[in-house]
Amino acid sequence: MTLTITATPGSASANSFLTETEQNAYMATRLNASVWTSTGVTCTETEKSAMIEAQRELNALCYVGLRVDTTQVLAWPRWWAPNPDDPTLGYYDSTVIPQRVKDAQAELAFQFLKAGTTDVASLPTTIGIIQKTIDVLSTTYSEYSQPTGLARFPRVYNMVRPLLVGSGNSASVLRG
């Protein structure tokens, strides 16, 4: 099956926050990115799959602001989403997807591709292991030191963290 990347902001059929050209431009400046082989305007089918999988992970997060249109399939663009990179404390334009989200998708797609056949979207296999003994070697894991979700990818998480509900950029309002 041939995949088509659709990155139209606000579209009811979008499957990516960024285009293949934007993904390849990000990868061109990324160190140690030899597993990403595409350049220019198109990606391989495997790379497109990684892009779509990364979008799914990012789309499931709870972002500040509101979706612009009830028919849009992706979480961005949004109304009333504070722009953490704007020194005047402005908001993102309701017609664009923030560069932070695009970069996060590009990086996460790379991490998915780099992992090969390992499903990095699933929980780590070592989570919850208190002690593991093989012959004379013994290892004890603390489940609290094992990051889960996007926290396993600090670069990706740090890109989107300011855009998430409860990140310090938003506040709950109680009306009496």
Image (cartoon, rainbow, N blue to C red):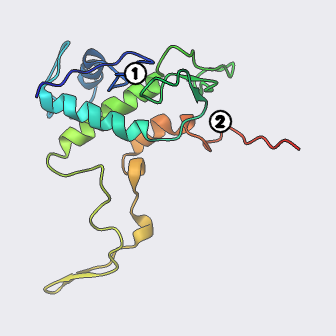
Compared to residue 158, the image places residue 121 above or below, namely below
Name which residue lies at 39% across and 51% down.
149
| Chain-order first, disc 1 or disc 2 | 1
Q: Nearer the viewer, residue 79 or 137?
A: 79
Image coordinates for residue 7, horizontal then vertical, percent: 34, 18
> What amino acid is at disc 2?
Asn
Using the rendered image of the protein, determine whether residue 77 is visible from the camera's viewpoint: yes
Image coordinates for residue 125, horizontal then vertical, percent: 26, 65
In which quadrant of the rendered image does the C terminus lie? top right
> What amino acid is at disc 1?
Ala
Compared to residue 170, the image places residue 116 above or below, namely below
Q: Name the quadrant containing residue 146.
A: bottom left
Image coordinates for residue 38, horizontal then vertical, percent: 14, 22
Q: Nearer the viewer, residue 21 or 64?
A: 64
The residue at which mark 1 appears reads as 12
Label 1 crowd bin: few (<14), some (14–19), many (20+), radius 10 Å: few
Compared to residue 41, the image places residue 53 above or below, namely below
Kindly give the residue lying farthest to the right in the view shown. Answer: 176
The residue at which mark 2 appears reads as 169
Label 2 crowd bin: few (<14), some (14–19), many (20+), radius 10 Å: some
Select label 1 or label 2 by which is in front.
1
Name which residue lies at 47% across and 41% down.
61
User: In the rendered structure, are the residues bearing label 1 and label 2 in contact, judged by CB atoms less than 8 Å apart?
Assistant: no
Image coordinates for residue 56, horizontal then vertical, percent: 35, 37
Name which residue lies at 15% across and 45% down.
116
In which quadrant of the rendered image does the N terminus lie? top left
